[in-house]
Structures are given as structure tokens and as C-alpha cells.
Amino acid sequence: MKSKKLLKLLYYFEDHGLLNWLPDAAYLKLIYRARVGTRLDLKDPKTFNEKLQWLKLHDRKPEYTQMVDKIEAKKFIAGIVGEEYVIPTLGVWERFEDIDFDALPDQFVLKCSHDSGGLVICRDKSKLDKAAAKQKIEKSLKRSYYNHGREWPYKNVKPRILAEQYMKDDNDQSGDPATTDYKFFCFGGVPKIMYIAKDKSNDPRTDYFDMDFNHLPIKVRDPNADIPPQKPKQFEEMKELASVLSKGFVHLRVDFYIFNNRVYVGELTFFHCSGLSPLTPEEWNKKCGDWIDLTSLSANGTQGHKK
């Protein structure tokens, strides 16, 4: 069976929960072969993507659940770098029916604590299609992000709904909040690579840079921008924040937004693209893998944040 047909079949099985019975290692070997196109070596992982799969299985600490929970992560981040770097939360609910829309401002963002993609952006509360929003949020609430990539930190995140303050850069004419992401790949608390992702919904473009802002040939999923993005004025500030937040972790991706020249931490991510998207060229897949030092971990996982 060709890999594309296999991948389509696996997506169907995933969406219907037909692979949930598989042990994590067996599942990851199957999905890795389908998505990345090579066999997964868990005994002697060398590449970036291989080592991310190894970390899913062997590096598990309770605090990781807090760090990926979109509600609880705000407390974690604020406790380390300060509340001024956290996008304000307007409310938290377990059911869509419990949302007090009258108490929310005219503009806000709804998302779920445990998932990725179930986003509702409200620019005008009087025009919000609540039925469509309910359908999208409830679909997200039912989805297990852990099952789709076996990213252990998400396994025990309690599904909840949160409303965030609508953040808009006055200099951005696109009409959408957060159309640009700045993501720093940190290894042992040291930022090594940053990528800038633009316009995720319509025409996603991604460009990778080293810490001197030299453009790198790395590609994971999206093509490069036609015109390389300029170095943000807040580059050094984000770099320092990423270093502080990732201290004590063998690998952590720290994401940022910039609104009206102010930096906000978006989220903390342990597994870029779940380690299931090919990283090219291969020399960079290997180089990034070399930066992940698995010798610092025991089979049960020993890393944690050092304040």
C-alpha cells in the first residue's frame, strides 16, 4: 500500500478512535512510517524527529501537563517571567452552555485548554454565530489531542473552554489577531533556532533563523515567504525570555506574539509538529537531533524546570 493511501486510512482510524488500543511505542512506529516516510528507531534515535518520539515515551513529569494546558500554562509562565507577558483570560467554563456572553466584551477569542485548532475569533459579539461556535468548540472538547500524536503531556489535561482578550496589533491591517508567530527552539535552556510563521490560515509561510538572525534552509511543512521577514525589534527580548522559560528542559519550543510592540508568550510546546512532519534538509534534522541530549534523562524522565 502506498504511503498516501496508508496515511489517509490512518487518519480515518485516528478520527474514529480505532487506533486508541495500540500501545504508544507501536502506534508511534506506525504513524511515523506513514507521515515521515522512514522507520522509527527508538533504540538509537539520532534525528530531531526520532528523539521527539523517544521523549514522548520516556520523559514524563506531572508539570508538563500544566505547561501545555492553555489555562494552567498562563500561571506557570507568569510565575517565571511575570504576568505582563501573558494574554489575559476573560473566563473559564467546562460547557459551552455555561459561557456568560453578556459578561464578555465585544471582541474576544474562545479556545479549548487541551486541543489545537478549535479556535473561535469574535470581532463583533452582535454578529457572532453562536451555533457555529458551539459546534466547533464542542467538537474540540470531545477530541483527544493525546491520541493523535501520543504527546504524553496532553493526556491528563482537563478539557475546558477559555475566553481570552482579543489581541490586535494596530499596525497589522490583516484584520486577524496573531497572524505572525515567533517560535524559539531551545535545547537545554539555550535558544538555537527561531522560526517566523505568517498567515497560518490562508497561505502559511515559515522561515527559520539562527540566533544571529541568519536565514536557515530548514523546511518542515510550509514553504518560505517570498520576501524573508525582517528581524523583529523584540528579537533579543524574546530570546532571553525563551532561555529563562526553557531552563532545565532538554528541549522546549517557546512561542511568542507581538502586539503593539509588546511581547506575549503564546504557548510552550515539547513536540514541534508532533515530530511527525519531515524536516529537511536531512543534515539539519540530524543537527537538531544532536542538540537534544538524551543522556541527561533516565528511562523514567528526570528533567524539570529549575527556577
Image (tube, grey):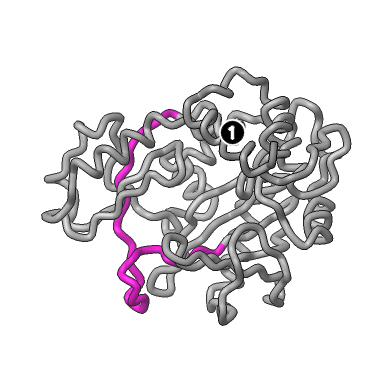
Magenta stretch contains residue 171 = yes
Q: Looking at the rendering, which quadrant does residue 96 occupy?
A: top left
Specify the segment rendered in magenta. Answer: 158-182
Q: Choose top left, top right, bottom left or bottom right for residue 23.
A: top right
Q: In this rendering, would 213 be left or right of 227?
A: right
Q: Quadrant of the N terminus?
A: top right
Identify the amino acid type marked 1: Leu
* Dot 1: element: helix
Report the residue at 30% width, 69% height from top.
Answer: 175
**Residue 32's spot in the image, x, y percent?**
70, 39
Q: Assign the C terminus to one quadrant of the image.
A: top right
235 or 120, nearer to the observer? 120
Instruction: For label 1, count other residues whose C-alpha is less than 10 Å away and answer few (under 14), some (14-19) or many (20+).
Output: some
Residue 47 at x, y = what percent? Answer: 81, 48
Residue 31 within the magenta-colored segment of the rendering: no
Quadrant of residue 162 within the rendered picture = top left
The residue positioned farthest toward the front in the image shown: 1
Of all residues, the one furthest to the top in this rendering is 21
Can residue 143 be seen from the camera position used here? yes
Asked whether, in this view, residue 44 is left or right of residue 244, the answer is right
Q: Decide whether the magenta segment is chiefly helix, strand or loop.
A: loop
Residue 65 visible somewhere in the drawing: no
Depicted 306 relative to depicted 57: above or below: below
Give the camera-side residue of 99 and 84.
99
Q: Is residue 76 left or right of residue 280?
A: left
- In the displayed structure, 142 sits above or below 284; it is above
Q: Which residue is mark 1?
A: 10
